[in-house]
Amino acid sequence: MQKITPCLWFDRNAEEAVNFYTSIFKDSKIIQTLRCGEAGPYPKGTVLLIHFQLAGQDFQALNGGPQFKFNQAISLSVDCEDQREVDELWAKLTADGGQASQCSWLTDKFGVSWQIVPRQLPQLLNDKDPQRAKRAMQAMMKMSKIDVAELQRAADGK
């Protein structure tokens, strides 16, 4: 187990969320599920905590109750190899009530914020030519889901 593991707080739907996430990302699995016993805090057998991995990264999902909600102050950033991976993850994570935001950000149906980032994005934004980087930044600021080809055209001044 890694030294620091993010814990995501859900309101009784942690198991549904974990099953959704592990179905999307390769190299993902449920490691352990802790269920409530006689002492609660929920009925015996109810999922309390799930230790799982997404793309080899450890996470925990807690059925903590309705007290806290997710917001965009914390997001999960996904390094995508190419436009195909961006498109695939974007479609899956915005399905069934997820919402697109701006500049590679989205919120899934559980309220978790994600950044779906093609590898080309930071490369273009850090281009040695400041004008290319500026044009790429201006193009990105108009996008929701990142379009790599459009970013490249913008950087090239086309």
Image (spheres, rainbow, N blue to C red):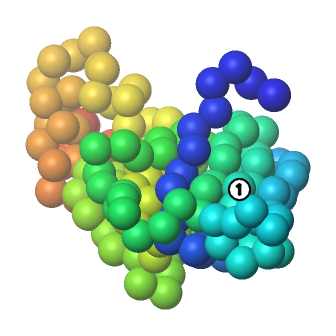
Tell me if I can see residue 24 in this picture.
no
Residue on which disc 1 sits = 49
Find numbered disc 1 in the image and state the secondary structure of the residue it sits on: strand
Observer-nearest residue: 1 or 91?
1
Looking at the picture, how far across and down is residue 140, in whole percent?
22, 47
The image shows residue 122 at horizontal and vertical percentages of 38, 29
Instruction: Pick the residue in front: 16 or 113.
Output: 16
Observer able to see residue 78: yes
Tell how many labels.
1
**Residue at x 70% of width, y 20% of height:** 3
Question: Which quarter of the figure has residue 48?
Answer: bottom right
> 34 or 155: which is nearer to us?
34
Indicate left or right for 77 with 74 as reference. Answer: right
Judged left or right of residue 139, residue 148 is: right
147 lies above or below 158? below
Identify the residue at image location x=81%, y=28%. 1
Say above or below: 38 vs 137: below
At horizontal 74% and vertical 24% (from top left) the residue drawn is 2
The picture places residue 53, in percent across and down from the top left corner, at 76, 46
**Apparent side of residue 16 relative to residue 9 in the rendered image (left or right):** right
Q: Amino acid at mark 1?
A: Leu
Residue 86 in the image, given as x and y percentages of width and height: 52, 57
Residue at 81% over, 57% down? 34
